Image (spheres, rainbow, N blue to C red):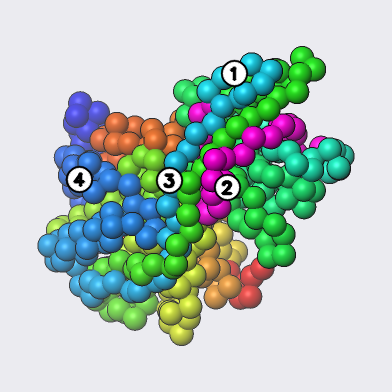
C-alpha cells in the first residue's frame, strides 16, 4: 500500500500540462488515476472470481457461474446494456493422467493432457520415445517414428522473444501430434512451455487435422523431458508408459458478457475493452485471463463512479472460449459485422498482471503518435510507452473490418512460469500492480472514447 500512497502524492503534484488535450480531459485522466490507485478493489474482485468460482474451462459449470457473476456485477456497478450473447464452445474434460519411464530404469513422469486431445486406449500406451527439437528433425527420422512416442524438446526462456520465447515453441504443442501422426507415431508429447523449473506441466490447446489419424497429445515437465533426453544421449532406448482419460463431449452453450457506458454525443460509436473469461482447468485462471477481465470491469466501474461520460460508448466484452479456438471472438465479430464501421478501436489485456509498460497498436498511419499523446498521463505509473504492432487474440477477428487493434503491455518476465499450469493462482498477482493496470486501461480507454478524432483504421480485408 505504501507504493500506492507514493503514487497518489505524485499525482497531486502533477503539472497541469498533459497530452490529453483540453481541461476536461486532463481532469478526467487525473481523476481516473486517483480512483484506480486509491485501493485494492480490483484485487478483491479478482479474489472472488478465482477463490470462490475458480477455473473456468469451456463447458464447465464454473465458467457459466462466472458469466452469471460478472453479469450481476456489471449491473451492480450501474452499467448499461448489460447482457450476454450466446456462443457455442467445445466441451473437453481431462480425466486420468499418469506416466512413467519403464526402461532402461523406472521414473515417474509429471504429465498433463493437452486441451482437445483424445484419450489413450484403455490401459494406456507403452512405446519407445524419440526426441526432436523441431519438425525438420522429425522429418529426418522418417520411418523411425512409426510406432513410437514423439517428444518435442524445444525449451523456452524468460523474455526470449521470437527466437526463444513462447511463440518459438507453441507450434509443437498445437500441431505436434498431427505432424507426428503423419509419420506413424502413436502419441506426441512436448516439453512443457514454461520458463521455471518447478516440475509443472503446462497445458494448452492442440489441434488435429482432417484426414490424419488422431493420436493422444500431452505435455510433460521440463525436468522429465531433460531426464529422457539424458538417457537417450547415453545411447539407451527409452520406453514410456502413459494413460490419459480425457474426452471430447458435444459442444456446449456459453456466452460473451457485454456491458457499456453509453456515449454522450456519439453513442453509436464504440470503443471495446476486451479480455477472455475462460481459463484452463489446472489453476484458477488468475493471470490468464482473470486479471484482464477485472481490468475491464474495474475500468468501467471507475469511469462511471467518477461521473465521467465519454463522447463515444465504452463497451466491455468478456469473451468466452479463447483458450481453445477464439470461439467468443469469432462469434462476436460475426454477430456485430454490420456495426464494425462504428467500432473505432478495440483494446485487449491478456498478458497477466505484471507492471504495466504501455501499449502496442496495429492501425493506420499516425496511430502511434496519437496514442502516445493520449497515454502521456500514464507516465506517472510507467505505462505511457506506445509502440507499433499490437492487439489481442479475442479482438483479432475484427481485423478484417479495419478495427484498430490495441494490446495492453505488461512485464511478462515471470508470466510463463505459471501460464496454463496449476500455479496460475491469485498469489501471483500483486494488488498494487493490478491497480496500475486498471488505471492504464481506464485512462487510455476513456481517451479513445472521448477524443475528437479517432485512431486511423486498418486497411480493410487485412490478411
Q: Nearer the viewer, mark 4 or mark 1?
A: 1
Q: CA distance from mark 2 to mark 1?
A: 22 Å
Q: How far, Cα to Cα, is label 2 from label 4?
A: 36 Å
Disc 3 to disc 4, how far (Cα)? Answer: 23 Å
Residue depicted at 56% across the width and 27% down the height: 100
Nearest the camera: 364 or 351? 351
Question: In this rendering, does residue 229 appear at all?
Answer: yes
Residue 417 screen position, x and y as percent: 47, 31
Picture layout, residue 438 above or below residue 156: below
The residue closer to the viewer here, 447 or 452, is 447
In the image, residue 305 sits, relative to residue 410, either above or below, namely: below
Magenta stretch bounds = 109-137
Asked if residue 274 is among those painted magenta in the image, a careful observer would answer no
Nearer the observer, 164 or 455? 164
- Looking at the image, tell me whether mark 3 or mark 1 is earlier in sequence order: 3
Do the numbered discs 2 and 1 sit on residues whose CB atoms are within 8 Å? no
Could you say whether the residue bearing mark 1 is in a helix, strand or loop?
Answer: loop
| Mark 3, residue position | 95
Amino acid at each position: 500500500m505504501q507504493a500506492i500512497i507514493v503514487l497518489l502524492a505524485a499525482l497531486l503534484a502533477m503539472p497541469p500540462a498533459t497530452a490529453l488535450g483540453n481541461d476536461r480531459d486532463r481532469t478526467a485522466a487525473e481523476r481516473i488515476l486517483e480512483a484506480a490507485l486509491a485501493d485494492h478493489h480490483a484485487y478483491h474482485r479478482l479474489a472472488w472470481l478465482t477463490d470462490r468460482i475458480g477455473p473456468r474451462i469451456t463447458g464447465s459449470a464454473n465458467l457459466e457461474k462466472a458469466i452469471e457473476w460478472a453479469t450481476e456485477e456489471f449491473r451492480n456497478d450501474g452499467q448499461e446494456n448489460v447482457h450476454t450473447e450466446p456462443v457455442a464452445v467445445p466441451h473437453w474434460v481431462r480425466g486420468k493422467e499418469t506416466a512413467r519411464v519403464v526402461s532402461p530404469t523406472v521414473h515417474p513422469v509429471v504429465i498433463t493432457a493437452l486441451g482437445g486431445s483424445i484419450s489413450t486406449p484403455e490401459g494406456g500406451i507403452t512405446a519407445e520415445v524419440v526426441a526432436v527439437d523441431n519438425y525438420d528433425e522429425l522429418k529426418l527420422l522418417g520411418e523411425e517414428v512409426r510406432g513410437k512416442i514423439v517428444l518435442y524438446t524445444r525449451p523456452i526462456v524468460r523474455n526470449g522473444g521470437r527466437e526463444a520465447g513462447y511463440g518459438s515453441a507453441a507450434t509443437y504443442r498445437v500441431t505436434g501430434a498431427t505432424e507426428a501422426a503423419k509419420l506413424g507415431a502413436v502419441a506426441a508429447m512436448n516439453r512443457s512451455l514454461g520458463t521455471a523449473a518447478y516440475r509443472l506441466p503446462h497445458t494448452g490447446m492442440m489441434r488435429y487435422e482432417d484426414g490424419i489419424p488422431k493420436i493422444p497429445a500431452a505435455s510433460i515437465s521440463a525436468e522429465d523431458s531433460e531426464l529422457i533426453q539424458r538417457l537417450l544421449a547415453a545411447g539407451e532406448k527409452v520406453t514410456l508408459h502413459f494413460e490419459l482419460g480425457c474426452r471430447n463431449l458435444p459442444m456446449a452453450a456459453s456466452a460473451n458478457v457485454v456491458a457499456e457506458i453509453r456515449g454522450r454525443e456519439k453513442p453509436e460509436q464504440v470503443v471495446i475493452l476486451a479480455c477472455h473469461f475462460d481459463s484452463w482447468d489446472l489453476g484458477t485462471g488468475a493471470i490468464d485471463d482473470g486479471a484482464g477481465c477485472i481490468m475491464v470491469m474495474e475500468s468501467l466501474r471507475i469511469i462511471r463512479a467518477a461521473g465521467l461520460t465519454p463522447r463515444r460508448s465504452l463497451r466491455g466484452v468478456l469473451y468466452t472460449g479463447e483458450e481453445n479456438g477464439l470461439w467468443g471472438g469469432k462469434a462476436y465479430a460475426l454477430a456485430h459485422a454490420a456495426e464494425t464501421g462504428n467500432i473505432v478501436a478495440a483494446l485487449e489485456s491478456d498478458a497477466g498482471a505484471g507492471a504495466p509498460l504501455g501499449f502496442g497498436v496495429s492501425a493506420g498511419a499516425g496511430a502511434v503518435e496519437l496514442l502516445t499523446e493520449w497515454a502521456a498521463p500514464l507516465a506517472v505509473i510507467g505505462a505511457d510507452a506506445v509502440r507499433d504492432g499490437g492487439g489481442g487474440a479475442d479482438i483479432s477477428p475484427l481485423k478484417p473490418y479495419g478495427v484498430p487493434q490495441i494490446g495492453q503491455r505488461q512485464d511478462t518476465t515471470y508470466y510463463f512460469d505459471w501460464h496454463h499450469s496449476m500455479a496460475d493462482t491469485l498469489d501471483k498477482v500483486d494488488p498494487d500492480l493490478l491497480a496500475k493496470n486498471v488505471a492504464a486501461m481506464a485512462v487510455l480507454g476513456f481517451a479513445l472514447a472521448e477524443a475528437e478524432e479517432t485512431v486511423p483504421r486498418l486497411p480493410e480485408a487485412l490478411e
